[in-house]
Image (spheres, rainbow, N blue to C red):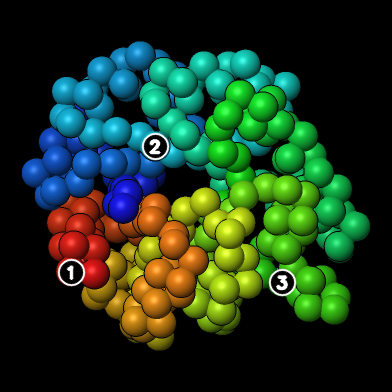
Amino acid sequence: MILAYQLYCSRSEPLERTLPTLREAGWRHVEGYGGLYDDPEGLRAALDAHGLTMPSGHFALGQVEGRAGEALRTARVLGMEKVLVPWIEPAARGADAEGWRALAGRVAAALEPLRAEGLAVGWHNHDWDLADLGGGVTPLDLMAEAGLGIELDLGWVARAGQDPAAWIDRLGGRILAVHVKDLAPAGVEAEDGWADLGHGTTDWAPVRAALRRHGIDHLVAEHDNPADPGRFARRSFDTLQSW
């Protein structure tokens, strides 16, 4: 089982403070994001110094499209096995099924050189990826149809008003990892409406059962805007350990 912390949660703090905090909280794995990759060797040295590994990382589409060699080198230096495109600016998103299908093909083509080198590659969803494009087909379905693996963000699935466990069953073997993130009670606007894992309103029992059904063993804790990243790291690791 890989229990990882998405470093984006701690973007408000210097890395030299974040890494020892994570280690002390019990974390052994992290997930990277594009803003950290300017010095892969330096980042790898910092991770090694604190006994942390980075099995997966988020790369903006612009960091892989036409730059696959650079992205591959970064992934290799950092010891990644999975490379994921997590976001696309609104202007580049599809307006309909045809547009999303074209975007899915573009993402798949950009990541193909990394797949050819043995890395798992995929797409990370947000709530807009769950929109019905007609006939029950969503952008997320089209990403999977294009041959991409999926890092299923369960928080954004829930924020879209849909059932995380049902989506785990729907995608099954296409899932490379999941983001586990919790929702604050309705009407709570602090921290953008997110909560520390296990301290929100999500019913995790059916989600955990679905994860077991499909043998999904790579869980990444995330909170998009924690007021105290250290608090989030400690409480969320404790929750995952209790699972």
Instruction: Note whether residue 74 is visible.
Output: yes
Quadrant of residue 48 in the image? top left
Q: Which residue is mark 1?
A: 242
- Residue 213: image x %, image y %? 46, 72
Q: Which residue is mark 2?
A: 55
Residue sitting at 30 percent across and 77 percent down? 200
Q: Amino acid at mark 3?
A: Ala
Q: Secondary structure at mark 2?
A: strand
Tell whether 59 sits left or right of 183.
Answer: right
Alpha-carbon span between mark 2 and mark 1: 22 Å
Q: Amino acid at mark 2?
A: Pro
Q: Which residue is mark 3?
A: 131
Q: Secondary structure at mark 3?
A: loop
Near-viewer residue (32 or 184): 32
Q: Secondary structure at mark 1?
A: helix
Q: Earlier in the sequence, mark 3 or mark 2?
A: 2
Task: Mark 3 vs mark 1: give the one in front.
Answer: 1
- Residue 211: image x %, image y %? 43, 68
Q: Amino acid at mark 1?
A: Ser
Residue sticking out furthest to the left:
24
Q: Earlier in the sequence, mark 2 or mark 1?
A: 2
Residue sitting at 62 percent across and 49 percent down? 149
Residue sitting at 28 percent across and 67 percent down? 197
Image quarter of the C terminus: bottom left
In contact (CB < 8 Å): disc 2 and disc 1: no
